[in-house]
Image (cartoon, rainbow, N blue to C red):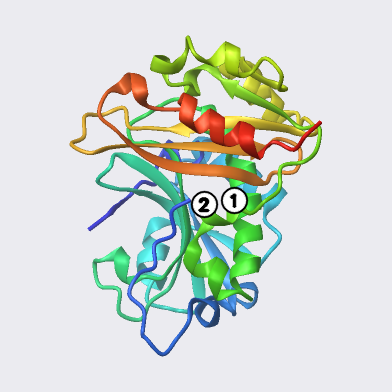
Amino acid sequence: MKKILLVFTMMACGVLGLGAQAKIYTKKMKVADFTEKTLKVVLSGNEMADAPFKADVVNHWRLSPYEFCSMSEFNALKTDDNYYFMFIVSRADEIDYLEIVKGNPQPGDNLEKMLSVVSLPLRASGDRGVRYLAYLGAYLDFFQDFIADAMVSDIVGYSGLSRQALAVKLPKDSGVRIADVDLASGSADEIPSMLADKDVRVVSAEEADNLMLSAADRTLVSYSVRPVRDVKHKYCFTLLIGAGDHKLYYCNKQYYKQDETAGFTTQVIKKILWRLPKQ
């Protein structure tokens, strides 16, 4: 059984789990009632730890009615398909995902039997840092954009959040800021010459996070998630998020063997540069 993490990680990047699905139903039909149902936001029970997450939900969630609930309430209600649930789930890749699922009358002890509406890496399992807090509000906003589109389009629902991000046009005159902690160390020497004629800069993690928190206009900020614990198969997620509009502009999952190759590599940055509109 997947372990639901209801600790400080919950307050603290586009995989869409399709879950078990009856063939006669489409994804669109299964989530068409999302705005009519109540979203249960599962809390840890630690008021100090829950406070930042609750504040972000209050400030950002608009798509459906919502209520906060405990883990025990989730276990009691998970068989009721009148509810959707949002929580953090830790997976075998040692990544914690922010995920929304729909109640299932027969989930048993297997959360994979619950329809996954949307899921995105939030942080590494066991990482006690709080950088993710600067990005959590944006996650909630582009989750809502994705769900609203998935309610009317099976193409969006089945393709997932990461593919939808590729279809979003980067705003004209936008600047890209890549946090140094998100940069693959093996690519550090090659980056400066690539960025000479573009408004793309490598900045400190603090500066990148402050740009997100201040909702900097026409500024895209990097965010990467990779495991900090030892794991057999290592995957890193690289995201590019609009600080001002809270749109997801890029989300890529990459396999890596050596730690210095994890993060924004020269190949990833080239893809981003190619998408930037001409000034």
Q: Could you tell me which quadrant the C terminus lies in?
A: top right
Q: Nearer the viewer, residue 108 or 32?
A: 32
Q: Residue furthest left?
A: 232
Q: Is residue 13 visible?
A: no
Q: In the displayed structure, does residue 63 sit left or right of residue 190?
A: right
Identify which amino acid the numbered label 2 is placed on. Ser
Q: Could you tell me which quadrant the N terminus lies in?
A: bottom left
Q: Which residue is mark 1?
A: 165
Q: Position of residue 206 (x, y in %)?
A: 60, 17
Residue at position x 41%, y 64% from top? 74
Q: In the displayed structure, does residue 187 sit left or right of residue 170?
A: left
Q: CA distance from mark 2 to mark 1?
A: 5 Å
Q: Which mark is residue 162?
A: 2
Q: Position of residue 32 (x, y in %)?
A: 59, 79
Q: Is residue 233 above or below residue 61?
A: above
Q: In the displayed structure, does residue 171 sit left or right of residue 41?
A: right
**Labels in figure, total:** 2
Asked if marks 2 and 1 touch (Cβ < 8 Å), the reply is yes
Classify mark 2: helix, strand or loop.
Answer: helix
Identify which amino acid the numbered label 1 is placed on. Ala
Residue at position x 69%, y 44% from top? 246
Classify mark 1: helix, strand or loop.
Answer: helix
Q: Is residue 235 visible?
A: yes
